[in-house]
Image (cartoon, rainbow, N blue to C red):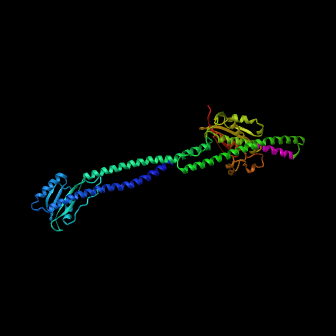
């Protein structure tokens, strides 16, 4: 953005500077040319007046004047009569053909006083001519003066150099002003962007920026108010989930004891058995809500996006051995697809929670005797966990919905579950700077891929 602003300001300033500089340079050259034309025109007029009073047969006085004129000014002069015969001359004519044409025009009463605009690259000499008249308006001869424009050209070059130097100084001042102006405008934007990034990562608050243009200050205040309101709403939401979950634990425990007493008195009661099942489901939902609130709190307070909270070394064999004997996973066949030990950039308990959630879902939804394959390997600078099953899987349209709170596939809604398992998994993974994705297995089933920071262990 700074580059775009600088380009715009400098382009506008440069165009304005050129729009002023070009006419100024032209005016300086024209003024010096006009002064030269007046000065040398007056000198030619004196020569014409002297030629008009000189006897063409005895032009001694005219020749003597021209000699003195050449000694002083160093400019060539030629005077001719009505037939074009030279009466007096001094110096040399560089372009004889052009001189003859100008003298012919002057003998026809067409004076040639105009000088081309003197520029730093103009020729060093420019001729002018005028008719010589004697007591009538009819020209009886002509005089030519070859004007030396070297001094005028030097004056124009000097004035142009001064103007261009001033333009360079103005351009430098414009660049300095543009840099300061863009810094003044964009510095609060950069501060606001950094604060917003830190706020999104949970490493700092977003405060108003008291510098820069008033509009940006007002914007920063509005964004800060919005961010504070959002953070307060999120904190209230997390606190509400945690408080409600904690507060409901005691009533649930009391209800559990009473239901257990009822079941002891009448084990065949269907209503009491259904109530016990509902209590189990409600208790599981509260446990998952507490886990979700805790994981989301950790994810929002990570010191740096993508950084792991801790590291540990494990393998797929170790994970399979840990869960193979658990009673809550009975009926699930576990297979280790890899044996290498890998450095995993997360807490050991978090990785175990992730694997348990995936295995529990496999046991619930992948059929009567499902098989889960656990693979853990290092891929580049990432530790990749893949858990695959041989169940029926999910339709392609349901895959993007996995991980939404309380979402359950239509084929699973009649089965026990809370719809929070993958939401908790996603929060745990995010708290450790990782990612997760769900895809169809081959030839069937589901494959969940979770990545953390990591490396191979040697």
Identify the residue at horizontal 40%, vertical 49% (top origin): 170
Q: Looking at the image, which is closer to me, 17 or 363?
A: 17
Task: Let me know if residue 278 is in the magenta part.
Answer: yes
| Residue 447, placed above or below residue 40 | above
Residue 362 appears anywhere in the view: no
Measured as percent of width and height from the top left, residue 289 is found at 73, 43
Residue 451 pos. (x, y %):
64, 40
Res. 210 visible in picture: yes
Depth order, front residue of 242/36: 36
Where is residue 443? Give x, y as percent. Answer: 68, 46
Q: Does the magenta portion include 234? A: no
Query: In this view, which residue lies farthest toward the left?
Result: 58
SS assignment for the magenta stretch, majority: helix
Q: Quadrant of residue 145?
A: bottom left
Query: Viewed as shown, does residue 423 lie left or right of 164?
Result: right
Q: Quadrant of residue 435?
A: top right
Across and down, in percent, residue 298 comes to 67, 40
Q: Residue at x 22, y 56 (%)?
A: 147
Determine whether, in the image, residue 8 is placed left or right of residue 229. Answer: left
Q: Quadrant of the C terminus?
A: top right
The front one of 446 and 413 is 413
Q: Which residues are magenta?
A: 271-284
Which residue shows up at 15% across the image and 53% down it? 68
Q: Is residue 137 left or right of residue 213?
A: left
């Amino acid at each position: 953005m700074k580059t775009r602003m600088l380009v715009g300001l400098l382009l506008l300033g440069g165009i304005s500077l050129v729009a002023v500089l070009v006419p100024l340079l032209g005016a300086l050259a024209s003024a010096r040319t006009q002064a030269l034309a007046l000065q040398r025109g007056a000198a030619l007029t004196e020569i014409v007046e002297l030629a008009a009073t000189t006897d063409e047969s005895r032009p001694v006085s005219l020749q003597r004047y021209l000699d003195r004129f050449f000694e002083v000014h160093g400019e060539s002069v030629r005077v001719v009569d009505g037939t074009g015969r030279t009466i007096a001359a001094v110096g040399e004519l560089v372009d004889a053909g052009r001189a003859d044409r100008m003298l012919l025009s002057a003998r026809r009463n067409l004076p040639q006083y105009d000088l081309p605009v003197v520029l730093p690259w103009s020729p060093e000499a420019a001729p002018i001519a005028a008719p010589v008249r004697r007591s009538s308006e009819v020209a009886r001869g002509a005089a030519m003066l070859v004007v030396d424009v070297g001094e005028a050209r030097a004056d124009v070059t000097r004035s142009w150099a001064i103007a261009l130097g001033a333009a360079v100084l103005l351009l430098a001042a414009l660049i300095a002003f543009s840099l300061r102006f863009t810094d003044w405008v964009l510095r609060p934007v950069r501060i606001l962007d950094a604060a917003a990034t830190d706020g999104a990562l949970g490493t700092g608050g977003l405060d108003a920026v008291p510098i820069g243009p008033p509009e940006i200050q007002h914007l920063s205040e509005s964004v800060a108010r919005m961010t504070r309101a959002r953070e307060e709403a999120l904190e209230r939401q997390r606190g509400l989930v945690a408080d409600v979950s904690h507060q409901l634990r005691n009533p649930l425990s009391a209800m559990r004891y009473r239901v257990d007493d009822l079941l002891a008195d009448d084990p065949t009661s269907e209503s009491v058995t259904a109530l016990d099942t509902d209590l189990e489901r409600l208790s599981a939902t509260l446990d998952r809500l507490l886990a979700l609130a805790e994981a989301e709190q950790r994810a929002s307070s990570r010191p740096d996006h993508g950084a792991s909270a801790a590291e540990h070394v494990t393998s797929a064999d170790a994970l399979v051995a840990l869960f193979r004997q658990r009673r809550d996973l009975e009926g699930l066949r576990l297979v280790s697809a890899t044996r290498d030990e890998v450095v995993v950039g997360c807490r050991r308990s978090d990785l175990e929670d992730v694997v348990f959630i995936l295995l529990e879902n496999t046991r619930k939804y992948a059929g009567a005797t499902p098989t889960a394959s656990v693979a853990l390997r290092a891929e580049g600078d990432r530790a990749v966990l893949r858990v695959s099953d041989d169940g029926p899987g999910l339709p392609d349209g349901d895959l993007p919905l996995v991980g939404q709170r309380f979402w359950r596939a239509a084929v699973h809604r009649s089965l026990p579950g809370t719809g929070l398992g993958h939401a908790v998994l996603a929060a745990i993974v995010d708290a450790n700077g990782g990612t997760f994705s769900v895809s169809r297995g081959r030839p069937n089933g589901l494959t969940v891929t979770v990545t953390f920071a990591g490396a191979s262990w040697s």
